[in-house]
Image (spheres, grey):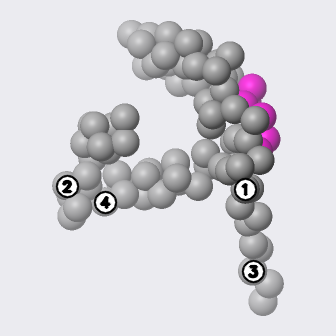
């Protein structure tokens, strides 16, 4: 049985923040869109523009927070509370 290991990038190797400065304003504008579907499509397009190292680094905490949020009935940590804590 082989276990696939994920190589976690060294955050010190990032040349910019996880969301690069050149994309930050576009992320903010996209998140503010009223229509849910347009917001999701816009976020997906922007995520594809994030450099690979940034994406891989961002993927792990995002996955963890999604798991935490999925258990909000037990832990009382839904998306809004997590956004306040980590926002």
> Helix, strand or loop at disc 4?
loop
Q: Position of residue 13 (x, y in %)?
A: 77, 47
| Residue, disc 2 | 76
Is residue 50 one of those drawn in magenta? yes
Q: CA distance from mark 4 to mark 3?
A: 26 Å
The residue under label 4 is 71
Location of residue 32 in the rendering, given as x and y in whole percent from the top left corner: 42, 13
Name the element at disc 2.
loop
**Residue named by callout 3:** 3
- The residue indicated by pointer 1 is 10
Q: Does label 3 or label 1 sit earlier along the sequence?
A: 3
> Label 1, label 2: how many angstroms apart (C-alpha)?
32 Å
| Magenta stretch in the rendered image | 48-53
Marks 1 and 2 close (CB-CB < 8 Å): no
Residue at image point 30% right, 43% down? 85
Q: Earlier in the sequence, mark 4 or mark 3?
A: 3
Please name the predominant secondary structure of the magenta segment in the image. Answer: helix
Circle 2 Cα neighbour tier, 10 Å, few/some/many (<14 / 14–19 / ≥20)? few
């Amino acid at each position: 049985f082989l276990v696939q290991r994920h190589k976690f990038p060294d955050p010190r190797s990032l040349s910019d923040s996880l969301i690069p400065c050149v994309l930050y304003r576009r992320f903010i504008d996209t998140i503010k869109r009223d229509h849910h579907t347009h917001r999701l499509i816009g976020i997906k397009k922007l995520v594809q523009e994030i450099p690979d190292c940034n994406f891989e680094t961002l993927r792990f905490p995002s996955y963890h927070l999604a798991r935490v949020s999925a258990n909000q009935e037990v832990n009382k940590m839904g998306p809004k509370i997590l956004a306040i804590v980590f926002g």
